[in-house]
Amino acid sequence: MPGPYTLSGRLLVNKQYPDRWALTEALLPIVRKELEDLVAAGCAEISVDEPSMSCYAYREDTRRFVDIFNRTVEPVIGRTRVCTHLCFGNYRARAVGPRRVAPMFPAFLDFKCDEMHVEMASREFAEIELIAQIAARMDAAVGIVDVKSYYIETPRDIADRVRLCLKHAPPERLVFAPDCGLSQTARWAARQKLANMVEGVKLVRKELGIGA
C-alpha cells in the first residue's frame, strides 16, 4: 500500500492543507489505521511503498522522510513483516527523479522495516554495492527485472544478476523482485519476465545447495 507522502502527491493543496507536508500529515493517521486493520485481519506481510520519497530525496529533508515513515508503521512494528519499496518513478515508463540511491543514505537506513527494495535492473546495477549497507540493517530486496524494457531477461541473465548481488550481501539477506510494479508492462511481457526471474533464481539456489 502507498504511504502518506506518496499518496499526498496525488492530491491538490488547498486552504486547509496549504502544502504537501500538511497533506501528508493529514493522511498519516488514515494509513496507520489501515495498517492496524490489516494486521488485525491476519496480514503477515505488508509493503508500505514510498517511491515519492526516493524520487525527491535529492532535494528534500531525508530525516523528515524517515520520521514520516516510522510514525506511519509504528503501530505494526513487530506485529507483521514490514517492507518498503524505493524507486525513481514510472510515469509513462520514465523516471521522475535523479536515479541515484546515494542521496537517500544513510538516512533511509533508519526506516523501521524488515525489508527495503531498491531499483537496480533499469540502472544497469549502478550502486549495487550499496545493498551491503541495507543488508547490514534489514533484508535487501533487489530489482533484477527491468519493467520499463521489453527485453525479456533470460533465466541465465537473471542468474548472473543474482550472483552479482551475492558479491555484496549474504543469501539469507537477499530478496529478488522486478524493479517496480508491472502495471504499465504488457501482460505477455510481464508474465514471461516473472517466469524467467523465478527460473533464474532457482538456478543459483541449486548452485548454492539451497532448497526451493
Image: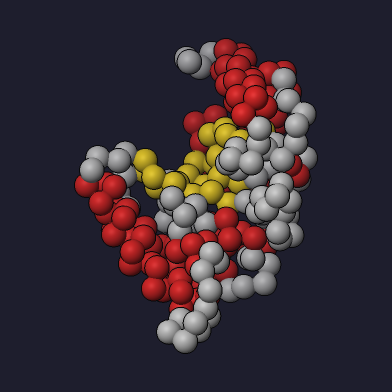
Left or right relative to 100: residue 191: left
Determine whether 196 is above or below 138 in the image.
Answer: above
Task: Identify the residue shown where x is 73% and y is 51%.
Answer: 94
Q: Position of residue 133 (x, y in %)?
A: 59, 49
Left or right relative to 126: residue 167: left
Task: Identify the residue shown where x is 49% and y is 82%.
Answer: 14
Left or right relative to 190: residue 29: left
Toward the left, the furthest residue is 40
Q: Position of residue 52 (x, y in %)?
A: 58, 61
Q: Nearer the viewer, residue 86 or 15?
A: 15
Task: Identify the residue shown where x is 39% and y is 73%.
Answer: 26
Toward the bottom, the furthest residue is 15
Q: Nearer the viewer, residue 63 or 155?
A: 155
Determine whether 198 is above or below 41 in the image.
Answer: above
Q: Position of residue 163 (x, y in %)?
A: 68, 26
- Classify residue 194 by image quadrant: top right
Task: Identify the residue shown where x is 54% and y is 49%.
Answer: 85
Q: Is residue 60 visible to the viewer in this orientation of the structure?
A: yes
Q: Is residue 132 visible to the viewer in this orientation of the structure?
A: no
Determine whether 177 is above or below 77 in the image.
Answer: above
